[in-house]
Image: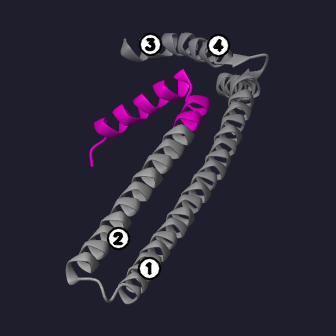
């Protein structure tokens, strides 16, 4: 009886397997081929509408960052030039101070020679007064130089920061700092 049942079932099984093969095809092509075509089409549309604009946006941002970096380099060079100018002024003032000291010493010596007949007390007083005057002028010149240099530096730094740091830059700098703190060392 099992052989008879097997013979009767074989045409049914053959019909079912043919239907399964037909179901796995669409317009005469296998389903996996349609699925592959669908995937390729989806990736193509994704590249066209998403990847190209994103790539262009990233390139534009990179260009902006490079321009800002170059501008910052120029500003740093300007600040370095200003610092070099301040150093040269400081050197000139120090040279002038040395000349004032030298002149003071020469004047003191000349006064001492011309007034050699005066008492030792008078010559000591003149020398002490000259040294105090030199130190006073030196201190005043150095204080003036420091005030001028500090004012110039503060003014330049304030101008640069006021002009260049925007609220977006502050937010970006804060976000970068937080990100660096969160990253493991």
Q: Which of the two discs, 1 and 3, sits closer to the camera?
A: 1
Rounded to the nearest whole Å, what is the CA distance between mark 2 and mark 4? 115 Å
Residue contact at pointers 2 and 1, CB within 8 angstroms: yes
The disc at residue 107 is 1
Earlier residue among tags 2 and 3: 3
Answer whether residue 178 is magenta in the image.
Answer: yes
Quarter of image, res 164: top right
Q: Give the range drawn in magenta.
A: 158-185
User: How far from the left and from the top, in percent, is residue 67?
Assistant: 70, 43
**Side (left or right) of 2 relative to 72:** left
Rounded to the nearest whole Å, what is the CA distance between mark 2 and mark 1? 9 Å
Q: Mark 4 points at which residue?
A: 23
Earlier residue among tags 1 and 4: 4
* Residue drawn at 60 percent across, 15 percent down: 20
Neighbours of disc 1 within 10 Å: few (<14), some (14-19), many (20+):
some
User: How far from the left and from the top, in percent, is residue 90?
Assistant: 50, 63
Rounded to the nearest whole Å, what is the CA distance between mark 2 and mark 3? 138 Å
Q: Foreground: 37 or 170?
A: 170
Q: Mark 3 points at which residue?
A: 4
User: How far from the left and from the top, in percent, is residue 125?
Assistant: 25, 72
């Amino acid at each position: 009886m099992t052989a008879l049942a097997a013979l009767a079932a074989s045409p049914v099984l053959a019909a079912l397997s043919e239907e399964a093969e037909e179901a796995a095809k669409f317009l005469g092509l296998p389903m996996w081929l349609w699925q592959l075509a669908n995937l390729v089409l989806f990736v193509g549309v994704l590249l066209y509408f998403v990847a190209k604009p994103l790539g262009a946006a990233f390139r534009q941002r990179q260009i902006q960052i490079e321009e800002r970096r170059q501008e910052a380099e120029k500003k740093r060079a300007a600040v370095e030039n200003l610092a070099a100018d301040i150093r040269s002024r400081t050197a000139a003032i120090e040279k002038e101070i040395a000349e004032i000291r030298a002149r003071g010493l020469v004047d003191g010596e000349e006064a001492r020679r011309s007034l050699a007949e005066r008492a030792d007390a008078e010559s000591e007083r003149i020398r002490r007064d000259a040294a105090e005057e030199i130190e006073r002028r030196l201190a005043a010149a150095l204080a003036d130089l420091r005030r001028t240099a500090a004012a110039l530096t503060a003014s330049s730094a304030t101008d640069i920061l006021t002009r260049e740091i925007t609220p977006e830059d502050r937010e970006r700098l804060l976000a970068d700092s937080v990100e660096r703190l969160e990253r493991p060392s």
